[in-house]
Amino acid sequence: MEKKILFPQVGGFVHGGDYNPEQWLDRPDILEEDVRLMKKAGMNSATLGVFSWSVLEPREGEFHFQWLEDIIERLYQNGIYTVLATPSGARPAWLDEAYPEAMRVDEMGLRAHHGGRHNHCMSSPIYREKTAIIDRKLAERFGSHPGVIMYHISNEFSGECFCPHCAGKFRAYLEEKYDHDIEKLNAAWWTAFWSHRYNSFEQIEPPFVHGETSVMGLNLEWKRFTTWNTNDFMQAEIDALRSVTPDVPVTANFMRLFGGLDYRKMAPALDAISWDNYPPFHNDRETLGETMVETAFHHAVMRSLKRGKPFMMMESAPGLVNWQAVNKVKRPGVHRLACLQAAACGSDTVQYFQWRKGRGSYEQFHGAVVDHLGTDDTRIFREVAEVGELLKKIAPAAGTLVKTKAALLFDWDNRWAIDDAKAFAQATKRYGSTCSDIWKAFFRLGVDMDVVGSDENLDDYDVVVAPMLFMLQPGTAANLKAFVERGGQLLATYCTGYVNEEQLCFLGGFPGDGLKDLFGIISEEIDTFYPSDRNGIRLTDGTIWEVRDYAEILRVQDAEVLGTYTEDFYQGGAALTCRAFGKGKAYYVAARTDGARMESLFEKMLTDAGIPVRRLPEGVECHVRTGESGSYAFYLNNTLEAVSLPGITGRDLVTDREVAGELTLPACGVAVVHTAAE
């Protein structure tokens, strides 16, 4: 397996972060000191220009680039490369004063005032024009500089705009989708309900909060359009840069399971996936190990957006953040764990927000490598420098990949459809957390799952889990059938196959589109629980799984019943089934139960698929990256006690020692064990 090195110039892992020298142009002493401290911290990269527009172009058409050129050159001469951002994430005041249409309109129809960030109109022709101008000028001035290794497009895309430009583009988008035939749209959206039929596309408005919000098809298409329009804006920025420098790679920083955009639709335009990782460390509801494994799930989501290539952890806090409900400081050793986890899960970068704290404004107390103290003798600086040394030691693992034979299906528009459905219980739908709960159960069995879309090719996988696949895309049912028929192990849950891509219910029984024949069952009803309601699933071996929130009442056609309900009028009815289909098996869990309770079932599926199961001590993670030089097993001890792991051999790159049968990890310890390719 060949390596997929993101940055050959660096020759290993990128270690860097957001740097805002424009805030310190009146302090050349600080700018000089920054370079010295970056080198001492083992930084080989800095992200520049993210929010620099008002300094780069202080007045319309007046460009001041010399300060940026001086910084890029100084960094390069000291072995530090630049990730150069386009500044479109926050507009200068002159732009909003001259062109107020660049500011967003909210769901009440009110135009925003100048201020904040991430609040521009994606459709505004003048904003696109001004963005393209500065993007091209940046590319012309810096794109050929040997120190510039990547473009960073805008920052944390988010939000929606209800202005006339966006409403007009939305109508054009719908006309194109529905072949300029309003009756096709009426049929797809079921607009005869409440007499909401449209006579023309011109009558359609976005779902204003005080307007039309009862047509599920409209709400869903607006979400899809917002992704489409954001992607179109991002692509316009990319096109402007590539018109000058076609060979400089591009990225845009994503945000966990952000609900406003379908990242899977945006990924193809990017050369690498990057994301901003801010776990709620040391909260009062879970252990450190649980926080870490939840974060590993989000790493897997990002890794899977562009399989076959490492991703980037573009932002993380070297200390605390300033925007969580409670802003806790990372405890000693946790920074190293978090950084190595990103690398373990497939990231080729460890990057921070921010390098140096600003003196004022919104993020003046957000964590940074260099505090207001301004020295290198702080705990956080020392821990960052330690990570810098560690990344050098494990540099051979850069460019290798996490490869797995198991996948979890997650679709953004399925999430939107579930959240918008006037069904079930509004407070307990929890599609995202249901997916992560199942992912974590597999991880406890030693299996790193990819997180893929329901319409993606499943040929690389032998086990697939599809939680709450409420909406079926065209071809999804056929995709799942083909997977099981060729020998795959598939598990689906309650709420599968209720609606099509337009949110119209399937007729003839759920799960629809032929999936009832794959699973051999029909879901006749779904019972929704109050928190005080109780039920369970009794397996054939007498084990009982506790049920909460939802329970479907099944009609079994030709499936084998593996578990039945213990309570209520449907006591004794099927709750867990399995049907052989072709060379594989299709399991159906009709009620919500914890992923931990289902581990025995998951273990059977993995065993039948020939995927090894390996349980590690609680709080210990293992992720494996592989490449042409062999495998790199990352072990993370997320506990405050030393642990010993048997059956491990290879060379630990962290200690540069051979491991011959037993690996001992100290509290919050890490190891990267290399096993050479045979």
Image (cartoon, rainbow, N blue to C red):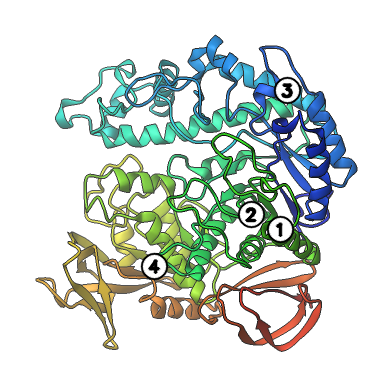
Residue indicated by mark 2 = 318
Residue placed most toward the observer, 657 or 11: 657
Badge 3 marks a residue whose secondary structure is helix
On the image, which quarter does residue 252 sit in? top right
Badge 2 marks a residue whose secondary structure is loop
| Labels 1 & 2 near each other (Cβ < 8 A) | yes
Identified at 25% across, 18% down, the residue is 199
Badge 1 marks a residue whose secondary structure is helix
Q: Amino acid at mark 1?
A: Val
Q: Where is 512 relative to 215, above or below?
A: below
Q: Most extreme residue toward the top, as rendered?
A: 98
Badge 4 marks a residue whose secondary structure is strand
Whether residue 313 sits left or right of residue 509 in the image: it is right
Q: Earlier in the sequence, mark 1 or mark 2?
A: 2
Viewer-nearest of discs 2 and 3: 2
| Labels 3 & 4 near each other (Cβ < 8 A) | no
Q: Amino acid at mark 3?
A: Arg
Residue 422 is marked as none
Residue indicated by mark 4 = 491
Whether residue 452 sits left or right of residue 510 in the image: it is right
Q: Most extreme residue toward the left, as rendered?
A: 569
Residue 136 is marked as 3
Residue indicated by mark 1 = 384
Q: Please say whether residue 486 is visible from this viewpoint.
A: no
